[in-house]
Amino acid sequence: MNPEEKINALRKELHEHNYRYYVLDSPVISDYEFDMKLKELQALEEANPQFRDSSSPTMRVGGEVTKNFNTVAHEHRMYSLDNSYSREELADWVQRIHRILGETRVEYTCELKYDGASISLTYENGHLLQALTRGDGFQGDDVTTNVKTIRSVPLQLRGDFPPKFEIRGEIILPLAGFEKMNELRVKEGEDPYMNPRNTASGSLKLQDSALVAERPLDCLLYALVGRDLGASTHFELLNKAREWGFKIPQEAELCKSLDEVFAFLDHWDIHRHELPYETDGVVIKVNQLQQQEELGYTAKSPRWAIAYKFKTEQAITTLEKITYQVGRTGAITPVANLKPVLLAGTTVKRASLHNADQIAKLDIREGDTVMVEKGGEIIPKIVGVDLSKRPQDSEPTTYIDTCPECHTPLERKEGEAQHFCPNSTGCPPQITGRIHHFISRKAMDIEGLGAETVELLFKEGLIRNYADLYTLTKEQVVPLERMADKSAENLIHGIAESVKIPFERVLFALGIRYVGETVAKVLARAYKNIDALMEASEESLTQVNEIGGRIAESVVSFFKEEKNREIIERLRNYGLKFSLSEEQLQNQTDRLKGKTLVVSGVFENLERTELKKLIEDNGGKVSSSISSKTSYLVAGNNMGPSKRTKAESLGVPIISEGEFMDLIK
Ligand SMILES: NC(=O)c1ccc[n+]([C@@H]2O[C@H](COP(=O)([O-])OP(=O)(O)OC[C@H]3O[C@@H](n4cnc5c(N)ncnc54)[C@H](O)[C@@H]3O)[C@@H](O)[C@H]2O)c1
Ligand SMILES: [Zn+2]
C-alpha cells in the first residue's frame, strides 16, 4: 500500500471503530489498539500533508449525535483530550507548553480520568436547565430528562453561584452497581454487559427515563465553562463548584512541578484499584486560566491538557482448553479455560475468545502460552500468543461445526461474526434460557421460581417450554430435589399470579429477538393486542416509531413459526394478558393517526417524555428531525433556533403546548 492508500484505509477503519464505540457502545478492539492506530494515522498525515482532510478521525471528536433525542448546538465546543502513554511524552508536552508560554512558571492540576460518557450541564439561576452529550463536539443529544434521574446531579444549587454557566463531567457507573446489574442479568439468563463505560453511555441514551432511573449511575464533574466565574485557576474553580453542591472528586491535586505530577501518577497507578469506579488514567491540566487561554486548542483537543493512560494490566498463562457456550438465542461463544493467574487483583480462569475469526486471527491453540489483558471488560481477553513457547505437537484449532449441546450443525449468517445453533426449540440451553428470560423480574416476574428450579424442572421432563409452567401441579413439584412443601406451594402460586402481568411485559417475556423492554412497550401501544401484532407485515411494523427493519424482520419470523403460535394460544387459554387493558386503551385515541410530530424545547406543564407519550397514545409518531413529512413542531421554551428556521422554511406549523393539548382533546 502506498501512503495515500494506507491513510484512507486507516481512516475508514477508525471511523468504523468510532461508530461502534460511541454510537453502538460496543467496541471490538481495545482502547490501546485504537489509540495506536490513531497515532499511526497521525504520523502518516504529518509526513504526507497533501492528504490532509478535516474529516479525518485525527481532526475530530469521535462521537455523533443520535436520532433519538433533540440535537442541540453546544454554546462552547466540547473537545477530546490528547493521549500519552509514557513520561517522555508528558515531558514533551511540557516542553511544547513552554515553547508557547516562554520560561514562565506553570502549575498543573492532576485529576483522575473517569471512564464513562462525557456530559455538559447548563445551569441558569441555580437550576439545571439542560444536559447534553458531547456528540460530535459541536452539537450533542439533549438527555436532560435522563440526567435528572441521577441523584448526585444537583437540580438546585447552593451558595454564591454565577447566574449562568456550564459544568462538564462524566456520567459513570460505579463498579459495585455495575456488578450488581450483571449478576441480575446473568441470573435472568441475559448476557452480562461488557464494561461499565459502555453501559453508562448506553444507559444515557435509553428512551425511557424510568429505566435510566433504575441504573445506579453517578456524575463526576471536572470543568467549569462560562464568563466571570470568579476565579483565576482551574483548581479554585473546582473548589467553588464543590461549594455550590457539585460532586467533584476529592482526588484532584495541585502540582507545582512535573516531578509532583509524576508522583501523582505513581500513587494512582497502584491505588486506582481501590476506587469505587474505573479510571483509565490521569488528566493533567495547566492550572492558570490565563495560560490556558494563551495555549488554546488544536483541531480536537486543548493544548493545555493531556491524558496520561495507565498501562492495561496483562498476565501470561497457559490456555488449557477451549470450550463453547450456547446462549439463549443460540449464539455460540468460545471460551478459553486458563491456568489460573493473578491479574489486576483478581484470579482469572477464563477469557473470552469472541468468535471463530478472532481465534483464527491470533491462531490461538490449546496448550499455547497466552497473554491476557483486562481492559475494562469483566471477562478478560487474550491479546497475544507466545509462539516461541508453542508445544511441538500443537494442532491448529478447528472451530466446532455442530452444537456442543444438541449436535445440530451450526449456522453462520452472512456478515455476522457469531455462529448460531438453529435448533431453537430443541437445544437445551436455548430452551432453559428462554424460560429464564420469561420468568425474569422485568418480564413475568414469577416469584418462587429461580434458575436452578428451571433447570431441574427441565431435566425431569416436566417443562419443555414456558407455556408448560402453567400446567405444573404441586404434586409434580414436591418430589424435586430440595423442594419443600411450602416452596412448591409458593411456586405454583407465583405462576398462577403471573397471569395478571400486563400485555407489554408478556410480549417482552416471549423472548422475541431484538424485542427488549422498550420495544415491547412500543409494539403493545401500537398494535394493542397480539392478534393485530401477529398479522403485522414488516412494512407496517417499520412504520411504527422506533421500529427498524431488523426488529420488524425478527417479529414477523417469530410469529410465522407454527410452534410459537401454538404456545401463544396455550398461554392465552391459561389466562395471560394478550391485549392492553381497558384503562390503557381509554387513554389511547387515533386523533393523531398518520401525523408525525417533532418536539423541541422545555415545556411549562409537561415533561418532554410525557408529551411524547401523549403523542404516541394518541396514535401519532414522534420524530426527532424536521422534514417535509413533519405535521407539527411542538415548540417549548428555549427551542433551538435552527429547528424554528427549518420548520418555517418547510411550512411546518409550529404549535405551543396549549395548542397541542387542544389537538388531542
Ligand atoms: N476501542 C475502540 O474501538 C475505540 C473507538 C473510539 C475511541 N476509543 C477510545 O476512546 C478514547 C477516545 O475518546 P475521547 O475522544 O472521548 O477521549 P478520551 O476519553 O481519551 O478523553 C477525553 C474525555 O475524557 C473525559 N474525562 C474523564 N475525566 C476527565 C477529567 N478529569 N478531565 C477532563 N476530561 C475527562 C472527558 O469526557 C473527555 O471528553 C480513547 O481512549 C480511545 O481509545 C476506543
Ligand atoms: Zn444446540
Image: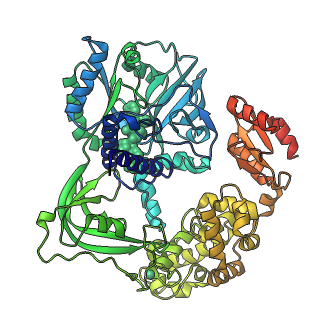
Q: Is residue 640 visible?
A: no
- Compared with 477, 253 (above or below) is above
Query: Left or right: 91 with respect to 290?
Result: left
Instruction: Name the colour scheme.
Output: rainbow
Q: Position of residue 168 (x, y in %)?
A: 48, 30
Q: Position of residue 80 (x, y in %)?
A: 42, 34
Picture quarter with ligand 2: bottom left
* Front-lying residue, 57 or 589: 57
Query: Left or right: 336 with respect to 425?
Result: left
- Compared with 244, 628 (above or below) is below
| The quadrant where residue 43 appears | top left
Q: Position of residue 151 (x, y in %)?
A: 52, 38
Q: Position of residue 440 (x, y in %)?
A: 54, 67
Q: Residue at x 46, y 61 (%)?
A: 184
Q: Residue at x 61, y 49 (%)?
A: 207
Q: Residue at x 48, y 49 (%)?
A: 19
Q: Residue at x 13, y 78 (%)?
A: 393
Q: Is residue 392 visible?
A: yes
* Front-lying residue, 659 or 357: 357
- Compared with 544, 400 (above or below) is below
Q: Number of callouts in the render?
A: 0
| The quadrant where residue 348 appears | bottom left
